[in-house]
Image (cartoon, rainbow, N blue to C red):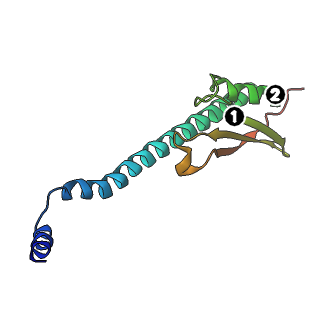
Amino acid sequence: MNKVFKSLSRTKYCESGSAAVEFAFIGLLLIAGTVGIVEFGRAFWLYNKLSNAIEKTSRKNLVKSIDDAQIAKEIKKDFPTAEVGTVWAEPPEVTVTLGPNFRTVKAVIAFKPVIPVLMGENIDITLTRRFWKVPSAT
């Protein structure tokens, strides 16, 4: 009985392995935070790329009036297709609706996270811009 008490009293002063246990708790948070930051950066990069494609198409529309199909084609041109499962597996879906003096362009692209367990399967990144409708010279 005395030996049991001695061995139990020794364990409260023993610190071997405590660093590994502390790292297990803190390391998990650090790794999850790093992956989250990388995923947010990728999503922001994709959003910025889509925004730049729409703005470039808008400038082209102002210089030379282009039709709805050409607008969608110009936006999708900045997103080359690749093998299935990569970032560029699917080009953005572009819809154009007509207004009185403008066209509303809506582009949706599916963001696929590297680790889908953390954020879900797909996150849709949506951008909507209005293009000035250039009057035809007739």
Q: Residue at x 11, y 73 (%)?
A: 9
Residue at the extreme right:
138
Horizontal arrangement in the rendering, residue 34 relative to residue 64 (left or right): left
> Residue 92 — which label?
1
Callout 2 crowding tier (Cα within 10 Å): few <14, some 14–19, many ≥20: few
Horizontal arrangement in the rendering, residue 81 relative to residue 13 (left or right): right
Front residue of this view, candidates 76 and 66: 76
The amino acid type of the residue labelled 2 equals: Ala
Picture quadrant where residue 107 is located: top right
Q: Say whether disc 1 or disc 2 marks the residue closer to the N-terminus.
A: 2
From this viewpoint, is residue 63 visible?
A: no
Q: Residue at x 36, y 55 (%)?
A: 29
Callout 1 crowding tier (Cα within 10 Å): few <14, some 14–19, many ≥20: many
Q: Residue at x 19, y 59 (%)?
A: 18
Quadrant of the frame with the N terminus? bottom left
Q: Residue at x 78, y 25 (%)?
A: 70
Q: Label 2: which residue?
A: 69
**For numbered disc 2, what is the local secondary structure?**
helix
From this viewpoint, is residue 59 visible?
A: yes
Residue at the extreme front:
1
Picture quadrant where residue 80 is located: top right
